[in-house]
Image (cartoon, rainbow, N blue to C red):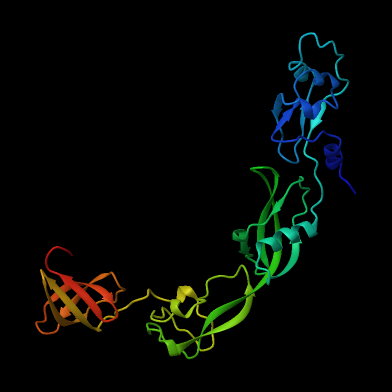
Amino acid sequence: MISFAALLLLSCIGPSGPRITAGDLAPAVPALRQVPASAVLGYAPRPGVTRTFTWAELSRHLPPDHGSKPAPEPVCVAWQMARPDPEAFRVAMQSALAPEAQLAILETSQNLIPPGPIHFPASNLRPATSGQGATWRGYVEYVPGLRYEIWARVDVRVAADRVVTVQDISPGTLIAPDMVRLEPFTTSAAQAGFASRLEDVVGRPARRALRAGTAVPANALGKHTDVQKGDTVRIKVNAGSATIGVEATALAPAAAGEIIPVRVNDTGRTVRARISGPGEATIQLTGGN
């Protein structure tokens, strides 16, 4: 059953763009044919809202000698609204997903919507707080650049890879290649937070205990390091045109490009060196850091 509000909108004239023109209202107000059809009478209302023009308002746009009798009724303007079409929602969603993605629409917004292209940007797909499907926010572009928001609750499944542990890993353990493996699985497209590449895991310390056979959360990993505290580091000391090689012990973990304190093994002196790779660092005595 159509509501009274919907019937009221259906009885109104639909605008042709963001501004109401004489051409929009001329079918209901013949006197407006005396002015250019492109003449702007006002701004179009938001979808779901009506704007009413009285004869006094309209006559201000007419020539003084228009000689027309007053309109018997005010003229209302509103976007023609309709119930959402689930199939149109599905087509818009599918176009934003990978071809192999599996889509199930669980629920959609039921508010009337204006005509126009429907969009569901993939970046707007978010996990639902209840855990029952994902919330996907979209919009109807009823005028270029103007949007009417819509939403849906969906279950989207995609093929992906994830990094899984093959043994128990204790907190602080530097993850080696033989501690993890890559496995394919089907997951919610809105699910995020798990490591999907071996190179994102290997060489990083575990921040908490990881049980064997579980996916590795990205937030369970510490920063990637090329050198660990206590590692022996081969240091190239650049002194002008000469280069000297010494061994030192790293006093802190670091990745390539970072500067950390190291203790020179021969002298016991602590200096600062820039890590250049696994087990390697440099010290510039002149003309640099």
Question: Where residue 264 appears, x then y in whole percent?
Answer: 14, 80
In the image, farthest residue toward the top = 65
Quarter-wise, where is residue 258 in the image? bottom left
User: At 74% from the left edge and 47% from the top edge, which residue is drawn?
Assistant: 116
Q: Is residue 213 above or below residue 217?
A: below
| Quarter containing the C terminus | bottom left
Query: Residue at (80%, 27%) from the top-left corner?
Result: 25
| x then y, percent, for residue 181 | 50, 86
Occupied quadrant, residue 280: bottom left
User: Residue 177: image x %, image y %?
Assistant: 43, 87
> Which residue is nearer to you in this view: 187 or 212?
187
Q: Position of residue 64 (x, y in %)?
A: 77, 9
Q: Nearer the viewer, residue 122 or 109?
A: 122
**Left or right: 253 with respect to 70?**
left
Q: Residue at x 11, y 65 (%)?
A: 286
Q: Is residue 285 above or below residue 264?
A: above
Residue nearer the viewer, 183 or 76: 183
